[in-house]
Image: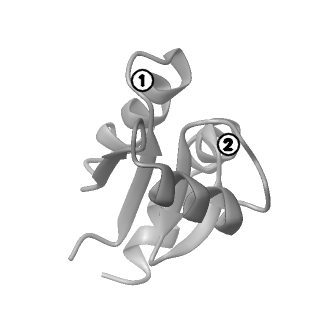
Amino acid sequence: MTAVEINTIRRRPYVSGAKASLKRPCIPYKEIDIVGHWERRDKVLGQAGGQITVPQFFYRNIHVGGHRHLETLDNSGELRKMIASHV
């Protein structure tokens, strides 16, 4: 099971940026395209505190945030620390 999950919609610029933030430190992730999957979309929105933007990033089934939060974690080095602490 992959601990990192990113919920996306195709062809969104922030989705590409978020995936790049995960690829740079080689963090394996599972991408879930929520287009047309209304039950999944509603679940993600509920877990994301009502945020309606994509991508939404989850770590070990806990909502972490969207693109901006993921980018901040990556730039500060906290993303790698967070993942490494559970490997």
Asked if the residues shown at circle 2 and circle 1 are in contact, with their CB atoms under 8 angstroms apart, the answer is: no
Classify 55 as above or below 82.
above
Classify 68 as above or below 79.
above
Task: Between residue 36 and residue 52, name the one nearer to us.
Answer: 36
Tag nearer the camera, 2 or 1 = 1
Q: In this view, does 19 lie to the left or right of 44?
A: left
Classify 15 as above or below 32.
above
The residue carrying mark 2 is 72
- Residue 15 screen position, x and y as percent: 47, 28
- N-terminal-most mark, 2 or 1: 1
Q: Residues within 10 Å of mark 1 (few under 14, many from 20)?
A: some
How far apart in space, not on screen, are marks 2 and 1 (Cα)?
A: 15 Å
Task: Between residue 76 and residue 18, name the one nearer to us.
Answer: 18
Q: Is residue 16 left or right of residue 75?
A: left
Q: Which residue is drawn at 62% across and 67% down?
A: 63
Where residue 27 is drawn, which disc sits there?
Answer: none
Query: What element does badge 2 sit on?
Result: helix
Q: State which quarter of the image contains the N terminus.
A: bottom left
Q: Is residue 68 left or right of residue 41?
A: right
- Residue 24 screen position, x and y as percent: 33, 37
Tell me which amino acid carries mark 1.
Ser
Q: How is the image coloured?
A: one colour
Tell me which amino acid carries mark 2.
Thr
Task: Between residue 77 and residue 71, name the one nearer to us.
Answer: 71
For the question of whether residue 78 can be seen, the reply is no
The residue carrying mark 1 is 16
- Residue 31 screen position, x and y as percent: 31, 47
Q: Which residue is drawn at 30% across and 81% down?
A: 87
Task: Between residue 41 and residue 77, name the one nearer to us.
Answer: 41
Query: What element does badge 1 sit on?
Result: helix
For the question of whether residue 33 can be seen, the reply is yes
